[in-house]
Amino acid sequence: MLQIFLPSIILIFIYFTTFFVIAQIIKNNSIVDIGWGFGFILIALYTFFFSEIITAKSVLVTILVLIWGSRLSYHILKRNWGKPEDFRYAKWRKEWGKWLLIRGFFQIFMLQGLLMLIIASPIIFINYSHQTGLHFWDYFGAAIWITGFLFESIGDYQLAQFIQKPENKGEIMKYGLWKYTRHPNYFGEATMWWGIYVIALSLPNGFWFIISPLTITILLLYVSGVPMLEKKFADNPKFQEYARKTPKFFPWFPKKPEQKK
């Protein structure tokens, strides 16, 4: 098993080390976010072309990763182009002081590399497998992935359109998919990885790769996604009112306002 993961480990290390060097030159560690989607594309393509056999399952998964990774990286690149370092990384830059280089290398770039390896593990496993043909789990997983992709891409588009309008400055996005979940893009991201995991279930020992969707879901829901963003709006009364009515992560109908007695 280690032999199929070792090339990807080396590839990820070189990839994020390169991003680290560039980040220090331009003094912007938030470029690591741009590298997130492209990194998965790199892993998918490498394991696809250097596997012993190309199967329908590996073609399916590689195409899904190409679609998701390209869209996400382009979206983040377009959103951050010409802007200063993201508030999260700028905060760490001040807090870490003289330890910025060491902590930045390990806690930002190498940590993301480790997480990428864990989350991408079913991709590597699938692309190196020899099972031909598609099965029920492949179609079911693809359907789950499509659902997640729609949530993430449509949610990002709706938010971008909302922010572009001057009259919405200072307002909270609560329309479209954002009416049913406060984080449709994060929900979509997690859902896509559950879809890829389901595709891996048709392979022997595929069950063990549940670590991939569990990791990304926990990260988004409890660590770096939802908590950090909601903390930013902790003192915003408009957001708090929105939060009282709208589910945090899993989509559902908003709560009806309580009627005064």
Image (cartoon, helix red, strand yellow):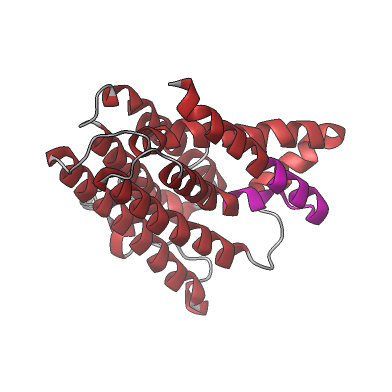
The region drawn magenta spans 17-33
Determine whether 85 is above or below 120 in the image: below
In the image: residue 69, left or right of residue 87? left
Question: What x and y, as percent, mark residue 123?
Answer: 38, 39
**Residue under the image location 29 percent in, 64 percent down:** 176
Chief SS of the magenta region: helix
The residue lying toward the viewer, choosing from 159 and 171, is 159
The image quarter containing residue 155 is bottom left
Residue 246 in view (yes/no): no
Side of 114 relative to 65 (left or right): right
Tell me where residue 224 appears, x and y as whole percent: 52, 38
Q: Is residue 93 magenta?
A: no
Furthest residue toward left: 136
Question: Quadrant of residue 77 in the image?
Answer: bottom right
Q: Residue at x 64, y 36 (%)?
A: 13
**Circle count:** 0
* Spot occupied by residue 223 in the image (x, y as percentages of width and height): 50, 33
Q: Is residue 63 visible?
A: yes
Residue 115, position in %: x, y? 52, 33
**In the displayed structure image, the side of residue 158 where residue 115 appears, left or right:** right
Residue closest to the far bottom: 166
Q: Is residue 25 magenta?
A: yes
Residue plotted at (52% across, 63% down): 74
Quadrant holding the N terminus: top left
Q: Nearer the viewer, residue 49 or 147?
A: 49
